[in-house]
Every structure is written in structure tokens, then in C-alpha cells.
Image: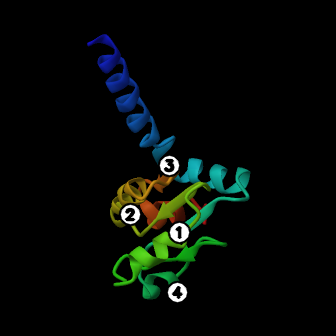
Amino acid sequence: MRPLFILYFISCTAFLTGCVVEENLNVSPHEFADIVKNNPDIQIIDVRTPQEWKEGKVTSAKCIDYFDPDILEKIESLDRDKPVLLYCATGGRSSEIAELLKEYGFKKIYNLRGGYKDLLKEGLH
């Protein structure tokens, strides 16, 4: 009986550790700016609409429209091993996409709390 328990414990532990996300953080505008500055390999994803994108964006951000019917294909084209920094207008849509990325196995996910509007308020765009 004991060997079966040990095998079960090892199997559960391996499964759970394989699903752990290293980081899934909501960050402030200042933390956002620091992450961008200190992580040249970060993938910056703007999930606003193309119209919102035209009104202003973070340099080097890639637009993946939250409402795009092909959003899952675009998410799958991202590198799961590189950190992802998400933002939208106020933080709601990007928060939902952060959860989706977690389900897709992304390891480091950052979401801009307050969105692009708060970034503008702080003069950090």
C-alpha cells in the first residue's frame, strides 16, 4: 500500500508543479515602466481596439485586439517562455487576457493596473 501512496504523491506533485505560473502580477504604471526599461525581451501586448491604438500606444507594443475573432491564434504566436506585459484602456480586458495566457501556459504575466489611462496620468507612456 505504501508504494502506491508514494507513486500517487509524486504524480500529483509533478502535475501541480508543471502547472504553476511563476508570476501573474497586476502592476502599477511605475512598475510597468520599470519592467519595460529593465526587460528588453519582454512582449508588450496592447489588447485595445485598433481605434484606441491609433490614439496612442506604448512604444514597441504589439496590438492584439481583445475583440478580434482570431485572438487565440495571435496569442498562440507569442513566446510562452518570455515575459508578457499586458495593457488595455483601464485594466479590465487585459486582466481577462492575463487569465487566458495563464491557461495557455505562459510563465510570467504582468497586467497594467489602471491601464493606458493611468499610464498617461502618470506621464509614463
Callout 3, which amino acid? Answer: Ser
User: Dot 2 corresponds to which residue?
Assistant: 97
User: Dot 4 corresponds to which residue?
Assistant: 54
Between residue 1 and residue 72, name the one nearer to us: 1
Q: Residue furthest top?
A: 2
Q: Residues within 10 Å of mark 1 (few under 14, many from 20)?
A: many
Give the image location of residue 61, x and y in percent.
Answer: 60, 72
Residues at circles 1 and 4 in contact by the CB criterion of under 8 Å:
no
Residues at circles 3 and 2 in contact by the CB criterion of under 8 Å:
no
Between the residue at mark 2 and the residue at mark 4, the CA separation in whole angstroms equals 21 Å
| Of the image marks 3 and 1, the number of the one nearer the N terminus | 3
* Residue drawn at x 50%, y 82% as measured from the top left: 53
Give the image location of residue 56, x and y in percent.
Answer: 55, 79
Give the image location of residue 44, x and y in percent.
Answer: 58, 65
Q: Which numbered disc covers residue 45?
A: 1
Q: Which of labels 2 and 4 is toward the front?
A: 2
User: Of helix, strand and loop, which one carries label 1?
Assistant: strand
Instruction: Give the vertical position of 56 relative to 85 (above or below).
Output: below
Rendered image coloring scheme: rainbow
Between the residue at mark 2 and the residue at mark 1, the CA separation in whole angstroms equals 10 Å
Q: Residues within 10 Å of mark 2 (few under 14, many from 20)?
A: many
Give the image location of residue 113, x and y in percent.
Answer: 43, 53
Where residue 89 sits, quadrant-wise, is bottom left
Where residue 37 sits, quadrant-wise, is bottom right
| Of the image marks 2 and 4, the number of the one nearer the N terminus | 4
Q: In this image, 37 relative to 13: left or right?
A: right
Between the residue at mark 3 and the residue at mark 1, the CA separation in whole angstroms equals 16 Å
Between the residue at mark 1 and the residue at mark 4, the CA separation in whole angstroms equals 15 Å
User: Dot 3 corresponds to which residue?
Assistant: 28
